[in-house]
Amino acid sequence: GLLRYNFHQKRWVWNEGMLRGETITDNVLHLLHSKMSCLHRNVQTLLTVMACFGSSTNETVVHRLSESPHFSGVRNGMAEALSDGFIRKDEEGCLHFAHDKVREAAYNLIHYSAKKQFHYNLGKVLYSLFLGEGNDAGDTILLIAGQINHGKEWIIGDQDFRIAVAELNMKAGKKAIDGCDHKTAYSYLRFAISLLPNDHWESHYDLSLSLSFLFSSAANSTCQYNEAEQMIRKTLEMARCLEDQLPSYLLLSQILQAQGKVKDVYDTCSTILTELGESIPESNTLAMASTQIVETINTYEKVGDKWLKGEKTVDKTLHKTLQFYNVISLAAYFCK
């Protein structure tokens, strides 16, 4: 049969090849669902929680989740789920579903109308466990945000919590960017922006500034240049001072450069360098551009030597100035 209990192995076993057949998918899910419906409540809770997380879950998360009264039985359900063969544990302590169909059947234990609420409640519990008192959740922050985000209709109704969730998603987006997963970062950051109130630039300036910059960066890295440029120009418009604008101007030059708008890159960098007190020639030649590149590299090397020696004499403005020189030198080389 498709699914049977092996008394010798003391676990459920199935025919892998047949399970992959599309024509029997409904039958397989029905059989698995029937078997799971008879399991102990702790096992069912564990399987549904893992199904919400995806195909795999870190055992540490399950143990931590068991500290909550709402999910206290998940740790106790793990042994039976393992022995019955619904899940397996690898050497690194990561729990995996034995098959995608097992996960699908486990997820179907949650009634369709209750799925959003289940995800949201699970996320809020994880949020309180991992992020209480300003703790660092590490990579788990992606998991937490992913669960809470299912409950946008409830998040929007809580003015204080919606800002907390926006900050959560910003941190998740930053974590994804650090891991070079810009598509995931874009998704988290876009959701965060959707939670901000209409007056967010006035009421939550610092959050708006950081979030808009990160979103533009993620959009640029996923080749969504129009969206990236639109957001970063809005950020420049709302920023309160040149110091707050500098990172966005640098990102704008990178967005323009990615679109091949080399002259716009040169003009943008030239304007900013002038505001920083630098003297930029109105016209340029290939030889002058080459000299600019060499001088920029030499300055970078001097600054780098001081940094390696532990000298803290280089201010942030100088760093930004050098970055703009680096961009404008290349732009000058290609367009002047």
Image (cartoon, rainbow, N blue to C red):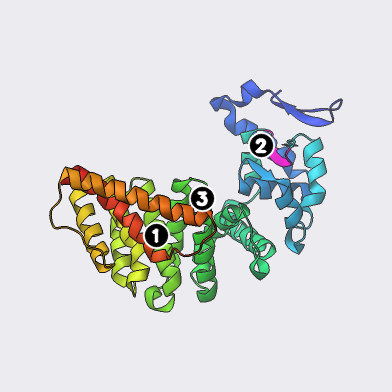
> Would you name the residue on which mark 3 appears?
178
Instruction: Residue at the far right: name it.
Output: 8
Separation of residues labelled 3 and 2 (CA atoms): 33 Å
> Residue 196, how many percent across, how many down?
43, 69
Identity of the residue drawn at 35% across and 55% down: 323
Residue range highlighted in magenta: 92-98
- Do we see residue 84 in this rendering? yes
Q: Which one is earlier in the sequence, the residue at label 1 or at label 2?
A: 2
Estimate how packed mark 2 is, as few (under 14), some (14 to 19) or many (20 or more) residues with alpha carbons within 10 Å. Answer: many
Residue 154 at x, y = what percent?
A: 53, 67
| Mark 3 residue type | Asp
User: Do labels 3 and 2 touch, CB within 8 Å?
Assistant: no
Q: Which residue is mark 1?
A: 319
In terms of depth relative to the viewer, which is nearer, 163 or 109? Answer: 163
| Nearer to us in this view, 199 or 173 | 173
Callout 2 secondary element: helix
Crowding near the residue tagged with mark 1, few <14, some 14–19, many ≥20 C-alpha atoms within 10 Å: few
Instruction: Give me the C-alpha separation between circle 1 and circle 2.
Output: 53 Å
Q: Name the side, left or right, on which 310 lies relative to 208.
A: right
Q: Residue furthest left?
A: 283
Asked if 7 appears above or below 271 in the picture, the reply is above
The answer to whether 323 is drawn above or below residue 162 in the figure is above
Q: Could you tell which of marks 1 and 3 lies nearer the N-terminus?
A: 3
At label 3, counting other C-alpha atoms closer than 10 Å, the crowd grade (few under 14, some 14-19, many 20 or more) is few
- Give percent across and percent down for residue 237: 28, 69
Residue 94 magenta-highlighted: yes
Residue type for callout 1: His
Q: Residue at x 46, y 62 (%)?
A: 192
Q: Which residue is mark 2?
A: 102
Tell whether position 37 is magenta. Answer: no
Q: Which element type, helix, strand or loop, lies under badge 3?
A: helix
| Residue at the (68%, 40%) spot, across then down | 33
